[in-house]
């Protein structure tokens, strides 16, 4: 069972890396780059940390859009008024990515690819090895029961973590691209005049 845990962990990492690769490809083909400006900072609290995410405003064809980026503002030494490059397909300006987020995705993708292959190979080796031990009558009932329980627990955790990604990918392809969805809001012209007038 430990072999299956390693194998499916590697497979999950490979799938995540592939999804990130497809997302990165979306933001490299037929896209344009515009200059955006940080207009707000939003605190997002997680279990052990707080991330300061910038809200970036950008203009395209006379319309103003706002996007909450994923990167931490302080890591990139930015503040309100700082500029950032925004990347998007001109046919869909509502699905955008900040340039800093592209770099973060690339790093996670490389880590996942790097871990997936050794985990899958090790998993297959352990699965074959444990199968041959069981065939020869080796291994005790207690160790096998513990191994199966631990393996089942890890598989449930992996499935639970991948579920949101799979749900987004399965949803209507009109609105999603490999888990990406519309993540920017258009600001009404009336709001623009109030803000800049």
Image (tube, grey):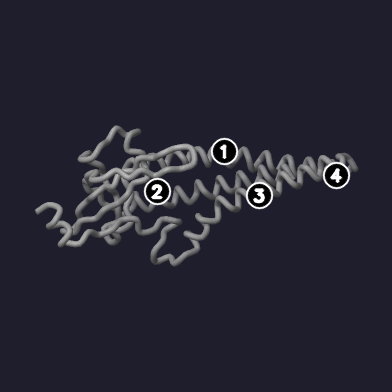
Disc 2 to disc 1, C-alpha distance: 19 Å
Measured in 3D between alpha carbons, the distance from the residue under mark 2 to the one under mark 3, in whole angstroms, is 28 Å
Of labels 1 and 4, earlier in sequence is 1
- The image shows residue 106 at horizontal and vertical percentages of 42, 41
The secondary element bearing badge 2 is classed as helix
**Residue at the spot of label 4:** 134
Spatial separation of the CA atoms under disc 1 and disc 3: 17 Å
Q: Residue at x 15, y 62 (%)?
A: 190
Give the mark toward the camera: 2 or 3: 3
Query: Is residue 184 left or right of 197 when viewed as pictured?
Result: right
- Mark 1 against mark 3, which lies toward the viewer? 3
Q: Nearer the viewer, residue 159 or 112?
A: 159
Q: On the image, numbered disc 1 is attached to which residue?
A: 115
Q: Is residue 175 above or below residue 49?
A: below
Image depth: mark 3 or mark 4 in front: 3
**Up-down: is 27 above or below 91?**
above
Identify the residue position indicated by label 3 in the image. 155
What residue is disc 2 on? 24
Q: How many marks?
A: 4
- The answer to whether the residue labelled 1 contacts the one labelled 4, judged by CB atoms less than 8 Å apart, is no
Which of these two is toward me, 39 or 62? 39
> Percent from the top left, x then y, of residue 24?
40, 48
- The x and y percentages for residue 196 are 12, 52
Secondary structure at numbered mark 3: helix
Sequence-wise, the earlier of marks 3 and 4 is 4
The residue located at (32%, 53%) in the rendering is 96
Image quarter (top left, top right, bottom left or bottom right) of the N terminus: top right
């Amino acid at each position: 069972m430990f072999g299956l845990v390693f194998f499916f962990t590697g497979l999950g990492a490979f799938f995540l890396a592939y999804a990130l690769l497809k997302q990165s490809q979306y933001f490299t083909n037929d896209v344009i780059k515009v200059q955006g400006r940080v207009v707000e900072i939003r605190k997002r609290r997680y279990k052990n940390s707080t991330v300061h995410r910038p809200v970036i405003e950008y203009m395209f064809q006379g319309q103003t859009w706002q996007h909450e980026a994923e990167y931490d503002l302080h890591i990139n030494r930015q503040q309100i008024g700082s500029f950032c490059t925004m990347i998007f397909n001109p046919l869909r300006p509502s699905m955008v990515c900040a340039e800093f987020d592209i770099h973060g995705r690339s790093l996670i993708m490389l880590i996942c690819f790097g871990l997936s292959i050794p985990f899958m190979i090790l998993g297959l080796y352990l699965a074959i090895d444990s199968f041959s031990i069981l065939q020869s009558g080796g291994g005790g009932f207690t160790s096998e029961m513990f191994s199966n329980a631990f393996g089942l627990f890890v598989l449930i955790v992996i499935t639970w973590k991948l579920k949101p990604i799979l749900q987004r990918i399965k949803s209507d392809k009109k609105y999603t691209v490999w888990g990406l969805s519309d993540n920017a809001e258009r600001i009404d012209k009336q709001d623009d005049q109030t803000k800049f007038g």
